[in-house]
Image (cartoon, rainbow, N blue to C red):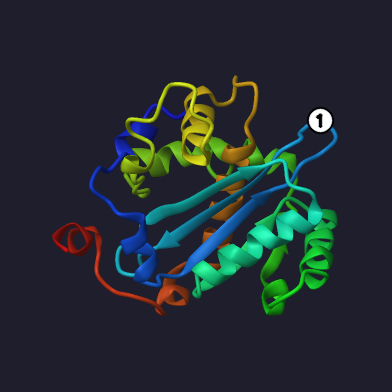
Amino acid sequence: MFPHFEDCYTPGIVVGEIIRRAWPTFAGVDLAGDKRPGNVIFVVAVDPTTQRRYPVEVLCGAWKSPEVAAQLAGVHARHPNLRVIMVENNGYQQSLIDWIKQTPGDTSYWYMVESYTTGFASKVNPVFGMPGMEIEFKNKAWVIPSAEFEGHPPHCRCGWCVWKGEMHDYPMGASTDTCMAMFFSREAISKWGTGGNLGVGGTGGIQGINDR
């Protein structure tokens, strides 16, 4: 489905430098179900000047509910400009809020959790659903830090490599968890991160990062 996905691979981008810019950041969460044992947290920073999306973390794990909340606490700590944490539906939203509130430490970010509630039909919409992301890849609206996974062994199971493989095979692959977490992060950006809402944070585009 995504023949232009690899066109967005951008060598030389340092994720740590993107994070230090404190750009507005959005997280998508794909939670495990009865037939899906794993959880995924996909974190994207958005350049407020160019509106381009920079994946900065792909976290995968067979975490239990307290561990999911602990992972999100880490994401919140590493990304002080985190705006929204989007999950699939209302039930998952409430569960995630409950898990966060029961976690020791800072739980002040529970209000960022929001559900994606427009249903499965919109996921397959050719413009607004998963297929529509190909338009974004073709236009290079995404900047993928390929140094995070280039050179990894073929069977590497780090989050970046799992995501690369699932995007390559979508929708025919055995799993799509990272793809859906990416989609939820994209929906969070679409709803809450456009126009003036991105005005807070660092400035400067991709050229500035490469020059440093």
Q: Position of residue 72 (x, y in %)?
A: 65, 62
User: Residue 196, relative to residue 127: is it above or below?
Assistant: below
- Horizontal arrangement in the rendering, residue 211 relative to residue 59 (left or right): left
User: Residue 11, relative to residue 164: is it above or below?
Assistant: below
Q: Which one is nearer the viewer's eye here, 31 or 121?
A: 31
Q: Quadrant of the C terminus?
A: bottom left
Give the residue furthest to the left.
211
Write the residue at 61% across / 46% down.
181
Q: Which one is nearer the viewer's eye here, 165 or 50?
A: 165
Q: Residue 52 sits in which quadrant?
A: bottom left
Q: How many marks?
A: 1
User: Residue 189, relative to residue 150: is it above or below?
Assistant: below
Q: Position of residue 145 (x, y in %)?
A: 34, 46
User: Residue 139, relative to residue 111: is it above or below?
Assistant: above
Crowd tier of the residue under label 1, counting other residues whose Cα lies within 10 Å: few below 14, some 14–19, many 20 or above: few
Q: Report helix, strand or loop for mark 1.
A: loop
Q: Which residue is mark 1?
A: 35
Q: Which one is nearer the viewer's eye here, 23 or 61?
A: 61
Inspect the image, locate mark 1, and give the three-letter code of the amino acid beneath it: Lys
Q: Position of residue 121 (x, y in %)?
A: 71, 39
- Horizontal arrangement in the rendering, residue 129 relative to residue 113 (left or right): left
Q: Position of residue 28 (x, y in %)?
A: 61, 54
Q: Residue 108 sits in which quadrant?
A: bottom right
Write the residue at 41% across / 62% down.
46
